[in-house]
Image (cartoon, rainbow, N blue to C red):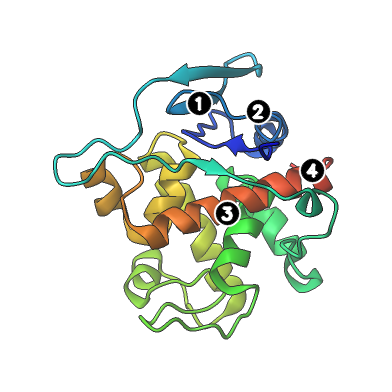
Amino acid sequence: MSKTRRRVGRFVARAAGSAFGPCLAVLACVLAVPVSADVIELSADGKVVVRAVDQPSVADSDVAPETIGEVEISPEALTQVTGSAAPPAYTAAVDYLADLNGISPALLEALVWQESRWRAGARSPVGAIGLAQLMPGTARDLQVNPHDPHANLAGGARYLRQQLDRFNGDVELALAAYNAGPGRVQRARGVPAIRETQLYVRAVVDRLFKMSNLQGTRP
């Protein structure tokens, strides 16, 4: 018997904040179908719309066409605590920053978990710093101190919002831009064919699925 899979495809959130949660809840129930992708949208009246798309999201002469594909979620993942949620020291800040930037708290939590596992002193081999793993240049552009955990978190939330705006609310593309840079996403006209970036997007969206099932009341 084949395992149940959930297809990500292009995941577009056209409403911010609390409207994002119901979209995730419905998306988590969508099973794989024999098309290249599904587009998940929120219409103006708040209804969730699912439609099939025949073309992959990546289409560039320099990049082999490739989609994010399918995210497989184990049964255990739907029943066990994921650990993604912000530690108590940052819960209020996450809620405030999510509201300030018009993003889902769960999205911000999933991103920070993937970036640093909520370790304020995290530093990557390429020099990214802190909870949201801001590069020094990005932190300067955002005018935040990357060594201050709350300022770092604020910078990450704002940078994520910028990418959502840049890519018309497409969560997958915004996450790809956060990881690989917006230039690469624009050149690829989709999620770049970079394994690290593709795994990054899958991991964050997978975690969002888990959180939406475990924390159904939290947007």
**Which callout, 3 or 1, points at the residue further toward the start of the chain?**
1
Is 133 placed above or below 3 here?
below
Quadrant of the image occupied by residue 85: bottom right
Q: Amino acid at mark 4?
A: Asn
Q: Nearer the viewer, residue 37 or 175?
A: 37
3D distance between C-alphas at marks 3 and 4:
14 Å
Give the SS element for disc 4.
helix
Give the SS element for disc 2.
loop
Percent from the top left, x then y, of residue 72? 62, 46
Position of 217 compared to 42: left or right?
right
Mark 3 is surrounded, within 10 Å at the Cα level, by few (under 14), some (14 to 19) or many (20 or more) other residues, namely many
The residue labelled by disc 3 is 204
Q: Amino acid at mark 3?
A: Val
Q: Residue at x 47, y 43 (%)?
A: 172
3D distance between C-alphas at marks 4 and 1:
20 Å
Q: Are marks 4 and 2 in contact (CB under 8 Å)?
A: no
Q: Are marks 1 and 2 in contact (CB under 8 Å)?
A: yes
Q: Amino acid at mark 2?
A: Val
The residue labelled by disc 4 is 213
Percent from the top left, x then y, of residue 75? 78, 48
Q: Residue at x 66, y 58 (%)?
A: 109
The residue labelled by disc 2 is 30
Location of the C terminus by quadrant is top right
